Image (cartoon, rainbow, N blue to C red):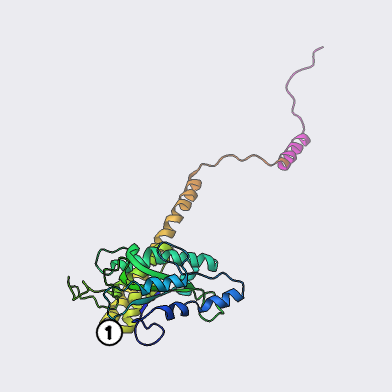
């Protein structure tokens, strides 16, 4: 599961002004889908399945109390399941879209809200998400979602900055405790695995890939050791399960072997042959004399 938090600079995700450019950009797939007669995925939030792009822009742009002209007004979270992850989310694109929407509402935004350490829930976050079915128009295995999330909570009173580093301290300037992005990414992954029943290979986990990309040699070694341990545990559990399945069969075989032999009935044809042989044999005298 690839989760990214974007925002800033002068590109697509410039975020010190209006979000209208991002909102318009996120609708680029809609026209192509309409031409093909395919369903268009609307924006949605925590409470509604359909939100117009005009409302998205209005709500985000007007939720910025006490933010300066140069402050970030919003961020964009991108959630991109892998092809293997998508397969466990449903058989059809629509099933997968519904599962992704549910995952965002129940897990991603809950983890996001809790990550600020301010007692917030997903209901307190002002966000609008949109699902894209593919990036290049040729693949159904590239579904992902973009989430425009306001810098302020829904009450327009608390600042939420996922780009502020977590320090572990109770107070960190205007942002209490900051935001631990690593913990957020890790929780999004584990939440997905639990919800979808996804059996993730250890080498595909966030911790493993992050260590390989950014970690020290010692951290990489720890993740390699952890992967080997997890793989061994899975193999041991598999063997134990196979043995438990074989025990009842083995018990049945042993029970049959201990059962005493029971005289089997003689086949009908064989019985007829034996009866014929008896008729051919001469009869013996019963030992009675003839009376005069």
For residue 285: magenta? yes
Q: Is residue 233 visible?
A: no
How far from the left and from the top, in percent, is residue 102? 43, 63
Identity of the residue furthest to the right in this view = 292
How far from the left and from the top, in percent, is residue 40? 54, 71
The residue range painted magenta reads 269-292
- Identify the residue at horizontal 47%, vertical 79% (top origin): 24
How far from the left and from the top, in percent, is residue 242? 44, 59
- Identify the residue at horizontal 51%, vertical 70% (top origin): 41
The quarter of the image holding the N terminus is bottom left
- The answer to whether residue 132 is above or below residue 10 is above
Q: Count every numbered label the image shows and give the total.
A: 1
Residue carrying label 1: 217
In the image, 43 versus 84, the foreground residue is: 43
How far from the left and from the top, in percent, is residue 130? 46, 72
Report the side of 288 relative to 220 (left or right): right
């Amino acid at each position: 599961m690839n989760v990214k938090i974007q925002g800033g600079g002068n590109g697509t995700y410039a975020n010190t002004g209006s979000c209208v450019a991002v909102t318009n950009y996120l609708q680029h797939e809609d026209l192509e889908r309409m031409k093909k007669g395919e369903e268009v995925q609307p924006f949605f939030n925590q409470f509604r399945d359909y939100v117009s792009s005009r409302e998205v822009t209005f709500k985000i742009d007007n939720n910025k109390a006490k933010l300066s002209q140069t402050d970030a007004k919003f961020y964009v979270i991108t959630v991109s399941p892998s092809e293997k992850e998508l397969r466990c989310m449903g058989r059809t694109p629509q099933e997968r879209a519904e599962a992704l929407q549910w995952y965002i509402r129940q897990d991603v935004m809950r983890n996001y809200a809790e990550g600020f350490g301010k007692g917030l829930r997903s209901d307190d976050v002002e966000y609008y998400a949109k699902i894209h079915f593919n990036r290049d128009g040729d693949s159904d295995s590239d579904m992902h979602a973009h989430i425009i999330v306001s810098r302020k909570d829904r009450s327009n009173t608390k600042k939420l900055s996922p780009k502020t580093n977590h320090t572990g301290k109770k107070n960190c300037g205007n942002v209490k405790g900051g935001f631990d992005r690593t913990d957020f990414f890790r929780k999004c992954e584990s939440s997905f695995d639990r919800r979808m029943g996804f059996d993730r290979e250890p080498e595909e986990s966030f911790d493993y890939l992050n260590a390989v990309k950014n970690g020290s040699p010692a951290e990489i070694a720890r993740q390699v050791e952890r992967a080997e341990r997890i793989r061994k545990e899975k193999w041991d559990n598999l063997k134990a399960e196979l043995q438990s399945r074989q025990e009842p069969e083995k018990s049945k075989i042993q029970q049959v072997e201990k059962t005493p032999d029971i005289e089997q009935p003689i086949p009908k044809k064989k019985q007829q042959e034996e009866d014929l042989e008896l008729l051919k044999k001469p009869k013996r005298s019963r030992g009675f004399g003839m009376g005069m």
